[in-house]
Image: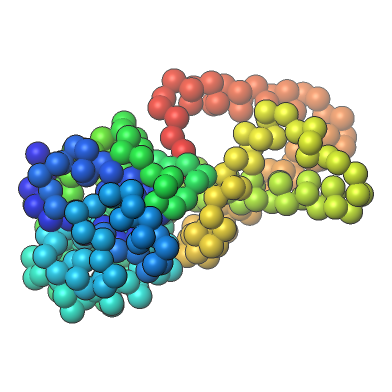
Amino acid sequence: MTVFKHIAIIGLGLIGSSAARATKAYCPDVTVSLYDKSEFVRDRARALNLGDNVTDDIQDAVREADLVLLCVPVRAMGIVAAAMAPALKKDVIICDTGSVKVSVIKTLQDNLPNHIIVPSHPLAGTENNGPDAGFAELFQDHPVILTPDAHTPAQAIAYIADYWEEIGGRINLMSAEHHDHVLALTSHLPHVIAYQLIGMVSGYEKKSRTPIMRYSAGSFRDATRVAASEPRLWQDIMLENAPALLPVLDHFIADLKKLRTAIASQDGDYLLEHFKESQKARLALKTDHDIHP
């Protein structure tokens, strides 16, 4: 059972609204205070009864909290941290859910130097967003990565781990640097590819003035699903994780060039070997739990 009695959730998109629902479902004795900068989102959160208190003031939301869960875009972390700082209790624990860790940790530490920060990243999601998109089961059996540093109190790490496990997550620990490299490969690059692929095909369609995407089958839809995700959110993620993403993107481009050369030179042996290795890796992935963005 979580030790937290009052949790403030800041940002009520998919992750924040799901955390609110999950906390109410699996930790019913916890008081949940909610804030989002959007008046429309706050009104929806009230209508959906997502928390015990939906406030128009971020400081009111965090004032009594012993855990503040930051579910805002990575480039909004500093603004949010500065805005709530004067109202935070001394012993409150701050936990972000951002998809980038190195830059976010620095931002939070700069803005909240006297508070305990336990960075986290739940590897769960869909391409949908907003308070209506969330659901209590989102985190069930999905990894939640914690990236504390050497100065993070062990007790605080344990408290955050217990909370995420209480609402369904599976805890993994790693360094912030390793997290950003791993997510550049498994999440950020796939989003780059999806946005680019559907953008390219859409461009062909507009230029040729003939229907193309109406003939897309499952493979195209599967490959571009995450391109329906919120563009500003992913703009922030790409730019914040550029140090880890750019080398990965360069590697991917180099591999594409090898494939192009093989196709142009009719090198069927190279293609077959490459496709076999890729198929083997994908089939192995099916034996694990599929996770979304």
Does residue 215 lie above or below 52 as drawn? Answer: above
Rendered residue at 32%/71% (across/down): 80
- Image coordinates of residue 278 in percent, x first then y, are 61, 28
Does residue 268 lie above or below 35 as drawn? Answer: above
Closest to the observer: 247 or 10? Answer: 10
- Image coordinates of residue 236 in percent, x first then y, are 50, 64
Rendered residue at 89%/54% (across/down): 207
Does residue 88 lie above or below 99 as drawn? Answer: below
Closest to the observer: 194 or 139? Answer: 139
- Image coordinates of residue 26 in percent, x first then y, are 19, 37
Left or right of 201 on screen, residue 25: left
Rendered residue at 92%/49% (across/down): 208
> What colour scheme governs how the chains and residues are painted in the rendered image of this protein?
rainbow
The quadrant in which residue 93 appears is: bottom left
The quadrant in which residue 59 appears is: bottom left
- Image coordinates of residue 2 in percent, x first then y, are 11, 44
